[in-house]
Image (tube, rainbow, N blue to C red):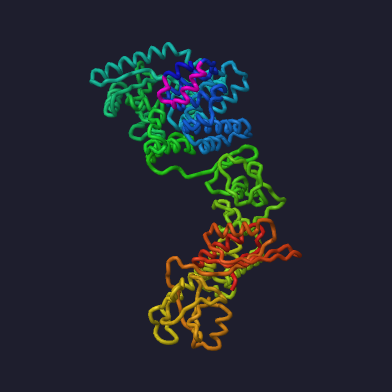
Amino acid sequence: MLSDWLDRQQAALPAVWVAAVREREGIALPALAAPVIELLDRLRADAEVQLAALLHLSPELRALHTPERAKAAPGLELLLDGLRAAEQVWSLHAQRESRGSAEGLRRLLLAIIRDLRVVLILLAEHLARLRAAGKAPREEQMALAQLAVDIHAPLANRLGIWQLKWELEDLAFRYLQPETYQRIARLLDEKRGDRERFIEEAKRRIRKLLADEGIDADVAGRPKHIYSIWKKMQRKGVPFSELYDVRAVRVLVNDIADCYAALGLVHQLWAPIPSEFDDYIAQPKGNDYRSLHTAVVGPEGRNLEVQIRTREMHEHAELGVAAHWRYKEGGKGEASFERKVAWMRQLLDSRDGDEESEAGLLAGFSTELIEDRVYLLTPRGEVVDLPKGATVLDFAYAVHTEVGHRCRGAKVNGRIVPLDFQPGSGDRVEIITGKTGEPRRDWLLPANGFLATGRARDKVRAWFHKLDRARNLQAGRELLEKELRKIAMLQADLAPVLEKFHLASLEELHVALALGDIGPSQVSRALHDHAQAQNAAPAAPTRAAPRKARKEDGSRFTVEGVGNLLVQLARCCQPVPGDAIVGYLTQGRGVSVHRQGCVAVERLIAAKPERALPVNWGRVAGSRYEVNVLIRAYDRKWLLKDLTNLIAQAEINILGMNSQVDPTRGLAEVRVALNVNDFQQLSELLGRLNAVPGVQEARRLG
């Protein structure tokens, strides 16, 4: 068998693989190999897919898979990776404790397979195993059948591969419900002779009618599948004798016009049953299934189902996506191949198993791919579906609200990780919980990165809503003070913040902060936006009318509102763009620019108010400003490394750093001089520094 297969496929395989397989062509392949290759041929799978199936089935051939040969066929490597990943899903299916996770396992399978041609191999292999399971132990039959029902048949259905879908369902039904299967099979057998005579008469009359009208058509009886009969009996609540489509014929014509012409002729020949007509040509199913279905009162007054479609539609109905599969002649970058992969992925990823609800997927054939998701495993093997970028804390809340509230840590694949860790598809996540549920308020701060899903954030907010008002007031007050201290604006007027967020009092602001309805960074942003708006508004100068702003040679900033004077930033408070600022005319050193609220400039202006000047930030691309930051943290190994790495990731230059440790308390104090672009960059950095493990405080100095 191997030699014959290689003779047919060698032109499509890399020479190094042809030579390697040729050396082993005398080996005995597993019994499943021949039927699997036959099925893949029917599905039009390419030589690379068929070789991957043989390597997967035969340990002797699998030994040929060396790193050198893998380089010669990178697509083969992806296929084998996908088959190995699928084995993990089968193992999870066998271990699961409930049937509710079958859809999650299907989605996990999709997520961890990088080459979707693997699905064709999986379908072919499982169907071959079901066919061969007739003499297998009962337990093995049940396991294979349940896996087919949960994973393989739904995938074949969504790909529209009917010839595999029906057989998978019938064989699984035979093993899972043998008595019901045999009862329906007996009903079919009892009427087989009468039914075959009836079908032959109907075929003869339809064939003659179409030929008389010049329509080229193939007319054949349509086989009925026991599982579909049983499902229709259950859905409609009718006995076997009342089903319309136990007696059925299929008509294949050349084009769509002939489809509707044939439909009209059939309805002229026999009276149609109005409630049993479906036009899947005008409105195809989600997997692009197209056909006309009608039921009529046929010969001898018996009901007859007639399906009418073109030959091309029939090919697609039998093979589904595989009927239009194009092999990678142009490589992975070939645009049409990538579009078909996207479409196949959409079909596989459809959440709802109901065929009618999947309509509309075809319209997205050339549109963007599905939203990225991750599929994570609980310790019991259940699948949790989350958006890409979700953290282990999001996972905890997805498992159960109380698990999230009590979360104190997490393990991913047995390794302890921080709560902001983002696991990937297939990772097994274990949540470490405390005895009582008490989420932290900093979980709600976006800059900390603990929660990525709105659902989890809503659950944390709901927990804080249940606390008494006094505790929320105190917590909100502490959050606000910490934020204002961080940006050195403790004395700021908060009236603009209350106005922006439509709050009546400072207490309402404290509660909103405590509940996470408003973030501390939103408060600081509102203060600076208000200050910038005030600075931008026209202001009457205290001295002469403002002249064109002067930019000091070599300076890296521009300040508007004064002219012909040296302008410099005050070292005491180190203002940066975005800060509210005020100018003070010094003796011999030009205008010194301070942050509003700076103690030094307020003292100077109180003594000589006539020297105060209204100033405003200009815009100079590429300018950077020096600012000092204080960080207090528990002393630990790699603290400075973590801090400097974070600052480097923010693309901020460090001008200087000084640290000292209090050994009695185990606290480290780090002062860092930085070059920042503006207030927003500084504020984001401070938020990230405060989230570093062990950091008690990170704030601006001055």
Taking the magenta stretch, the answer to whether it contains residue 16 is: yes
Asked if 100 appears above or below 250 in the picture, the reply is below
Number of numbered discs overlaid on the protein picture: 0
Query: Of 584 and 626, which appears nearest the observer?
Result: 626
Image coordinates of residue 73 in percent, x first then y, are 47, 31
In the image: residue 701, left or right of residue 369: right
Query: Of 61 and 36, which appears nearest the observer?
Result: 61
Asked if 2 appears above or below 394 in the picture, the reply is above
Residue 239 can be seen in this image: no
User: Who's the residue at 38% across and 37% down the image?
Assistant: 334
User: Who's the residue at 56% across and 60% down the image?
Assistant: 647
In the image: residue 215, left or right of residue 573: left
Image coordinates of residue 191 in percent, x first then y, are 45, 13
Residue 281 can be seen in this image: yes
Query: Which is the main secondary structure of the residues drawn in magenta?
Result: helix
Taking the magenta stretch, the answer to whether it contains residue 402 is: no
Query: Of 159 and 216, which appears nearest the observer?
Result: 159
- Residue 509 occupies which quadrant of the picture? bottom right
Q: What stretch is highlighted in magenta?
A: 8-25
Quadrant where the C terminus sits is: bottom right
Asked if 457 appears above or below 356 in the picture, the reply is below
Image coordinates of residue 529 in percent, x first then y, are 48, 69
In the image: residue 322, left or right of residue 86: left
